[in-house]
Image: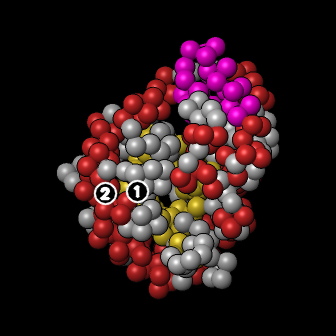
């Protein structure tokens, strides 16, 4: 597994996003999830990304159990900041008191003494970022956290946060389908020496070739505008472009998509999620796909920035990103 640098923290170029192991895209079996995580380590994956919001603690418990005896082989990343709001969209809490309490709870669920990379999952517009990151910095001082990260933060927020304490990584949705905000963010992170972690790098499955008609859209995906009837056909046409180029290259659409993403720069790593070992193996196969500069440009031109139909999240979710 080749490594890349996230603000001083070395991780493999392809990690595992663990959200789907907590029932987000269909029922997940804990024993199967733990086995998948251990298989991932055996295959060379060393970067595992969780959150206290995934299953509201369930995900961290699964990850912690799976990695017993393997802790020194992996980079553990998790996130805080989203809070339950029964009957409505998630709330956010970036207060210093919540930062401390959330970290201590995550450490207990993970069964570890230190978190390698700790993110603010969503920026709290009601709390100055300097206060939130200041509290996160105190976790570093106490030895509970090694490196700090932000998720879905806008460039100015990143600059203010980095001035308070060095930020190692920023995490934003980044794929061929949705990349405008990510590429704007990367102009800032590159200038500051901050690594970039691409989540949903396969367009939440749209770029794998596995979703070909509306009947295959269910669960969490059905809430996303990209999969809704008004937008599906346009996005399916973009995915078909990727599939055709992958066939010509002799790889799968997922592998071509990940290879294109990793070719964007040494500052980028990807954390595709899956519940299935064959998909994990397929994703890792992207490491064997070499693209020329001309191929990278041609792939990007086939799915132009801004071409996707529908926003990244439903309207409520869009209010909490890129802040």
Label number found at residue 62: 2
Tell me which residue sits at (46%, 66%) in the image.
53
Q: Depth check: 87 or 99 in front? A: 87
Whether residue 73 appears in this view of the structure is no
Magenta span: predominant SS is: helix
Q: Secondary structure at mark 1?
A: helix
Does the residue at mark 1 contact the one at mark 2 (Cβ under 8 Å)?
yes
Tell me which residue sits at (57%, 73%) in the image.
90
Residue denoted by label 1: 22
Whether residue 105 appears in this view of the structure is yes
Left or right of 69? Residue 137 is right
Tell me which residue sits at (47%, 82%) in the image.
98
Residue 298 colored in magenta in the image: no
Q: Write down the region rendered in magenta.
A: 236-264
Left or right of 305? Residue 201 is left
Q: Secondary structure at mark 2?
A: helix
On the image, the x and y values in percent for residue 193 come to 61, 53
Residue 249 colored in magenta in the image: yes
Q: Depth check: 280 or 265 in front? A: 280
């Amino acid at each position: 597994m080749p490594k890349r640098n996230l603000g001083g923290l070395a991780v493999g170029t392809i990690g595992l996003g663990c959200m789907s192991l907590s029932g987000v895209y269909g029922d997940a079996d804990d024993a199967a999830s733990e086995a998948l995580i251990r298989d991932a380590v055996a295959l060379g994956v060393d970067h595992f990304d969780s959150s206290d919001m995934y299953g509201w603690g369930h995900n961290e418990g699964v990850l912690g159990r799976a990695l017993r005896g393997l802790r020194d082989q992996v980079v553990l990343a998790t996130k805080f900041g989203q809070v339950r709001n029964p009957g409505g969209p998630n709330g956010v809490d970036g207060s210093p008191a919540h930062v401390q309490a959330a970290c201590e709870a995550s450490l207990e669920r993970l069964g570890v003494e230190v978190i390698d990379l700790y993110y603010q999952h969503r920026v709290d517009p009601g709390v100055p970022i300097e206060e939130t990151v200041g509290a996160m910095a105190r976790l570093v001082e106490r030895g509970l956290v090694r490196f700090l990260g932000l998720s879905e933060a806008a460039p100015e927020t990143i600059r203010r946060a980095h001035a308070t304490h060095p930020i190692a990584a920023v995490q934003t949705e980044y794929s061929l389908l949705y990349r405008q905000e990510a590429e704007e963010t990367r102009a800032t992170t590159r200038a500051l020496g901050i690594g970039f972690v691409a989540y949903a790098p396969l367009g939440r499955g749209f770029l794998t070739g596995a979703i070909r008609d509306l009947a295959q859209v269910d669960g969490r995906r059905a809430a996303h505008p990209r999969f809704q009837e008004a937008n599906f056909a346009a996005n399916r046409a973009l995915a078909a472009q990727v599939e055709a180029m992958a066939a010509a290259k002799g790889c799968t659409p997922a592998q071509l998509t990940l290879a294109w993403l990793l070719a964007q720069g040494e500052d980028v790593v990807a954390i595709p999620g899956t519940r299935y070992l064959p998909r994990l193996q397929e994703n890792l196969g992207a490491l064997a796909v070499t693209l020329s500069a001309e191929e990278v440009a041609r792939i990007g031109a086939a799915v132009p920035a801004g071409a996707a139909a529908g926003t990244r999240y439903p309207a409520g979710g869009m209010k909490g990103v890129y802040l």
